[in-house]
Image (cartoon, rainbow, N blue to C red):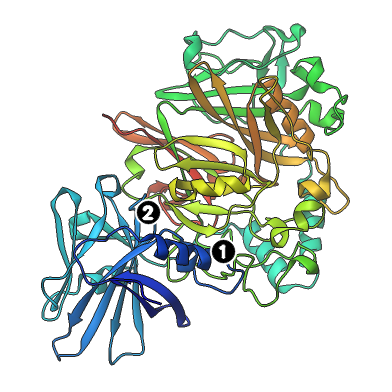
Amino acid sequence: MRLGRFLVRRLACATTAAIAVPFVIVAHASSVMPGPADEILAEQRIQYDFDTPKTILELQPGRIAAQAALRRRDGIPGLATLINLNPNANAWYLLLIDWQDDAAHLAYHLENRGAAEGALHLRTDSPVALALTGAGGLNCTLWMSVGRDALAEARATGLPYAPLCSGALYLRNHVAGRQTALERISDFLRDHVWGGDRVVNFVKEQFYRDAFREKGVGTATAPSAPSLPAALAPLPPSLAPETAGVGLLPEGLALDLATPGKELQIGQWYAVRDLRGVLVSVISPQYIESRFRSSREPNVNALDAVESGALVYLVAFDLQQLDLHFVLGTDHPRLDWSGRPPPSSRDPQLPGPDGVGSAAPLVRNGMVSPTEAPRTVATFAGGFKRSHGAFRSGQLAQRNHGSHYGFIEQGVIFSKLQPGLATVWVTDEGSVELATWAALDNELLPHIRYARQNGVPLIEYDAANGVGMPGELVNLWGPGNWSGSAEEALRTLRAGLCLQQNGGRRFLIYGYFSAATPSAMARVFQACRCRYAMHLDMNALEHTYLALYVHRDRELVVEHLIRGMEEVDRTAGNEFAPRFLSFPDDRDFFYLTWKPRP
């Protein structure tokens, strides 16, 4: 097959076990990465679509690459290949170095700090030096046949983000993510003990069912929240008339709110002190409007007394001021098979549902980039691990290999987004969307910067009536994959995410439900006038973790949503080290940053 001035090469990448990377399509050596021709994009799309074992590179249908010849001091020739994994993002690159006399192949995962300014390119003017150029005047030598090997030096640091080119780039190094004791025990039981998942479920059912339930200490009245312009706050929830002015004392709340007292009016939005664009509210299902508490709709259950009285904490983020990002943990979610889908949905010839069993040679390092850390406003835990991220029963279990939850980071597809699943995604223009993914949405893939799927929707938007309504599988444990125990005991600590629109302003709302079933979550999000809502994670504080970062008196103050969440953080010497921001974590998470100033 002739590809004009393009070549097809078989490359190999340095991993713990050598992994062949077939059909990396590259341009002839050039200082510029040209856009792929239509025929090359078509070939790469075939690699993406085919149900065969593949590498993580073949899961990137829009990648482009360029090559440059190298020569060592001893005269041995080599070849450098720079792969831009998503040319619409320009954020992540894979640099491969292959020497003619060496069976080992070197692979370096690079992160471009100046992604918004443009792409990186290989310089090809000298085979005795490996150099990159980029927008903004970047001109950096990474390796010389006689002289400095900046790549080797950066790898030797062992840092999750090792600076290169005076900090213009980072080399992403493999690091171990932190696990809590609960997660380590759970992973050991699931991975190494026969029937381990049932052991974990027994522990959850017996010890965690209502362990985090808060009822809230009610008061007859509470002072009103300091007035906020209506357009700068989310719409208030629809409450029962008798709750007007009723207050709660949320004993678990650890955030510093801009209000003089500790009592909060039910459903009112309170600003976080010294942190614009972030607001907090408390509510419980018993206080929402009666029409949301009934079970007249066929896809939600009636709420029992326990979850009706359980406190819900809501944190709203103004998307006009804040950008949303997503980061994979060092270990979770994995790319291999979940044990949940039935045998008929599994292909034993594939290492995972997408044909990929490992992210290698790409590096997942489970923490906020140092570039973004100074602008970070909040972090919160992401979704289910791969072991729980697929369907055991129902229609979704019978198609697409069990409909494993998909995820994308920095425009790089780690697991395909599956139709029918609740999805939060961010485009390369920064727009945040929550919706049920459809097959036609695959046309958006080149322009999606971040994405995370997590089950089926709690709330879906009813365009005909202009309101959010409970999803059709909310009260179906198996087809909805709502986790909990095998006996369908669904009430536990849960977290969720919803999108609300107030005029021209959109709010991403995080919900912490101290004891709830999916039905209670759907009812609260519906009463909060959310257009769409989805589940995140559950069962423990580390899985529902949320922290805010407030710059006050030249210090960074870390505030946790709930008392006890700080136990997941660390100390380094005498310094406090918050999770996700200061050290790698094995779990995935979201974070929000201030939008760049014009």
Three-letter residue code for mark 1: Asp
| The quadrant where residue 98 appears | bottom left
Residue toward you, 591 or 505: 505
Residue 578 visible, this orientation:
no
Q: Which comes before the other along the chain, label 2 or label 1?
A: 1
Of residue 8 and residue 320, the one placed in the foreground of this image is: 8
Give residue 49's mark: 1
For the C terminus, which image quadrant? top left
Image position, residue 364 (x, y; %): 45, 61
Q: What element does badge 1 sit on? A: helix
Label 2 crowd bin: few (<14), some (14–19), many (20+), radius 10 Å: few
Residue 591 vs 83, above or below: the answer is above
Tell me which corner region of the image, top left, top right, bottom left or bottom right, holds residue 374: top left
Residue drawn at the location 56% of the way across and 69% of the way down: 356
Q: Distance between the residues labelled 2 and 1?
A: 50 Å
Residue 338, percent across and down? 69, 64
Amino acid carrying mark 2 in the image = Gly
Q: In this view, does 348 lie to the left or right of 87?
A: right
State the residue at coordinates (85%, 45%).
489
Q: Name the residue under label 2.
A: 573
The 10 Å Cα crowd at callout 1, few under 14, some 14 to 19, many 20 or more, is some
In this rendering, the answer to whether 345 lies above or below 267 is: below
Q: Which residue is drawn at 58% across and 63% down?
A: 334
Tell me if I can see residue 50 in this picture. Answer: yes
Q: Where is residue 430 in the image (x, y as percent from the top left)?
A: 41, 37
